[in-house]
Image (spheres, rainbow, N blue to C red):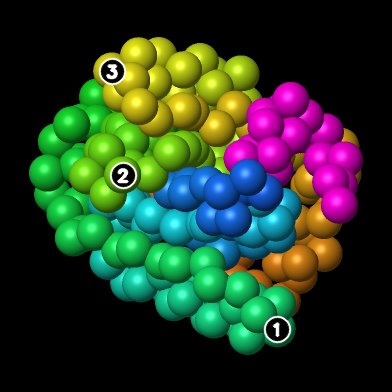
Amino acid sequence: MLVNYYNLSQALLKQVDEINKQTGIKRKLVIHGCCAPCSCYPIEVLDEYFDVTILYTNSNIYPREEYDIRLNELVDYIKTYNATHGSDVKLVVPTYDNVSYTKLIKDRGNHREGGEICFKCYEMRIRDAFEYAKQHHFDYAGTVMSISRQKSSSKLNEIGLQLQKEYPNIEFLIADFKKKGGQNRRDELSKDMYRQKYCGCVFSYQEYLKREEQSKPAM
Ligand code: SF4
């Protein structure tokens, strides 16, 4: 039965559902997942319609310890989710290369979070999903990042649709996971999970440290 998830295109879900029924095989989706709290609700929604692979392509995250903490939380979540739902959500973890990644976003230090450099950062990770989809013959590519209050869903969708033009056989999964109760459900599902204190890159990490310093009471 189709569930009304208004944060995804109803026409798309209907189409996917029909193809799944006709072929007896779920459409294959690879979706960039940045962490467990942001991925849990999208997994719950998408698992009904797609053969879901989460791509943990997050070389932006600094330091390595933080990258590992977020990854381990996601590994645990997917393991538990699959065991309790009888599902087969997969997780793919590409090589971590923060040094190269940081060079590509080196101007972020001169820009605010959520600006042009961040759009480039979104694009690099969504492109990774498209590349993976192309190499492994997936039908759809996407990202879970629209669940985040800090990220513009319209910008993420704009970037994804732009990339789609370069990958003719792959469709971008337009989504606004934060809408229609998505964030509440995410908060509920992730209440016991590790929550990061900053977006990810070294620049956002330094800004976080500065905020912490400034919030300390004067001696
Ligand atoms: S603040 Fe976040 S989105 Fe922006 S460049 Fe850093 S890691 Fe990427």
Residue drawn at 46 percent across, 17 percent down? 161
- How many neighbours does mark 3 have within 10 angstroms: few (below 14), some (14-19), or many (20 or more)? few
Range drawn in magenta: 1-19
Q: Relative to 120, does residue 83 appear above or below in the rendering?
A: below
Based on the picture, tell me whether residue 10 belongs to the magenta stretch: yes
Find out whether the residues at labels 1 and 2 contact each other: C-beta distance under 8 Å.
Answer: no
Picture disc at residue 84: 1
Residue type for callout 3: Glu
31 or 216: which is nearer to us? 31
Q: What residue is pinned by disc 2?
A: 137
Sequence-first tag of 2 and 3: 2
Residue 62 position within the rendered picture, expressed as x and y whole percent measured from the top left: 31, 56
Q: Which residue is mark 3?
A: 166
User: What's the CA distance linking mark 1 and mark 2?
Assistant: 28 Å
Label 1 and label 3: CA atoms lie apart by: 38 Å
At label 2, which amino acid type do we have? His
Above or below: residue 82 compared with residue 133: below
Q: CA distance from mark 2 to mark 3?
A: 15 Å
Q: Could one spot residue 25 in this view of the protein?
A: yes
Residue at (63, 85) in percent of width and height: 83
Looking at marks 1 and 2 on the same chain, the residue that comes earlier in the sequence is marked by 1
Q: Residue 13 appears at what percent x and percent y? A: 71, 36
Sequence-earlier tag: 1 or 3: 1
